[in-house]
């Protein structure tokens, strides 16, 4: 039995998308961070949390990896060179996309007002655009690793959607087309409609 905690407006969207792509049955508790439903499940109060076989798994990328490995889909086999390349790409996206968006969010509404530095957002936007251009140089097909959707695609496309909400301009037409193609998938659409 699988239960996912977190709304689709958070990083939980990544796990929702993977669950829908895999066609797995699961319960969904669309809650915000630090919700009462998370008590005892995560020390940080962050979402998503996946309850799987009585254990709680935190962190969206850890959840994606667990589900993909468990089902043997949307990932290269563990221990293979292809998996190492996939993991390197995933870590690049987490470092160069997710971390920038998270820093901007922290300085917009998460940190106490006296600790926010609004001016930091402009260099983050510049760096994000540069990183989008660099990522597109690594594109190997319809998706990042070739013609099949994999874990780094889910993270990258989610960050592309997050960038829109955060008002990070994305001027790379290839990246925009890639995100549109991924968001047109049935699994993505079902996940986005959940909340």
Image (cartoon, rainbow, N blue to C red):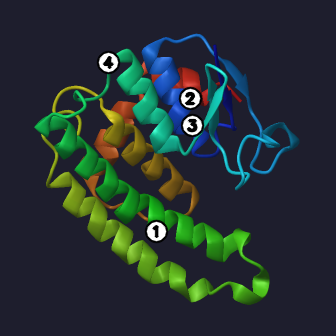
Task: Give the residue pinned by disc 3.
Answer: 13
Could you say which disc has been placed on residue 72 in the image? 4
Q: Where does the image place residue 65, in percent across and percent down from the top left?
A: 40, 34
Q: Is disc 4 surrounded by few (<14), some (14 to 19) or many (20+) residues within 10 Å?
A: few
Distance of label 2 from label 4 (alpha carbons): 17 Å
SS for dot 4 = loop
Whichever of labels 1 and 3 marks the residue nearer the N terminus, that label is 3
Number of callouts in the render?
4
| Residue 179 position (above or below residue 142) | below
Snapshot quadrant of residue 192: top right
Would you place residue 54 above or below residue 25 in this image?
Answer: below
In which quadrant is the N terminus drawn? top right
Q: Is residue 77 left or right of residue 106?
A: left
The residues bearing labels 2 and 1 have C-alpha atoms spaced at a distance of 23 Å
Q: Secondary structure at mark 1?
A: helix
Question: Which residue is the site of mark 1?
Answer: 100
Which residue corresponds to the image point at 22% horizontal and 27% vertical from the top-left? 77
Label ID, residue 156: none
Q: Is residue 28 left or right of residue 62?
A: right
Q: Which residue is mark 2?
A: 16
Mark-to-mark CA distance, 1 and 4: 31 Å
Q: Residues within 10 Å of mark 3 (few under 14, many from 20)?
A: many
Q: Residue furthest right?
A: 36
Q: Are marks 2 and 1 in contact (CB under 8 Å)?
A: no
Q: Secondary structure at mark 3?
A: helix
Q: Badges 1 and 4: C-beta atoms under 8 Å apart?
A: no
- Vertical comparison of 167 with 90: above or below: below
């Amino acid at each position: 039995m699988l239960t996912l905690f977190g709304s689709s407006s958070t990083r939980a969207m990544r796990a929702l998308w993977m669950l829908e792509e895999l066609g797995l049955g699961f319960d969904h508790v669309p809650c915000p961070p630090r919700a009462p439903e998370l008590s005892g499940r995560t020390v940080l109060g962050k979402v998503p949390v996946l309850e799987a076989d009585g254990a709680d798994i935190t962190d969206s990328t850890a959840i994606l990896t667990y589900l993909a490995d468990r089902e043997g889909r949307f990932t290269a086999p563990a221990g293979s060179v292809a998996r190492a390349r996939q993991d390197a790409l995933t870590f690049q996206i987490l470092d160069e996309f997710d971390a920038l968006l998270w820093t901007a969010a922290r300085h917009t509404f998460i940190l106490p007002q006296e600790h926010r530095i609004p001016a930091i957002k402009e260099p983050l936007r510049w760096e994000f655009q540069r990183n989008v251009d660099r990522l597109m140089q690594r594109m190997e097909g319809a998706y990042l690793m070739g013609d099949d959707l994999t874990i780094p695609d889910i993270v990258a496309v989610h960050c592309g959607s997050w960038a829109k909400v955060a008002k990070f301009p994305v001027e790379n037409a290839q990246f925009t087309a890639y995100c549109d193609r991924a968001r047109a998938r049935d699994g993505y659409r079902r996940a986005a409609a959940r909340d």
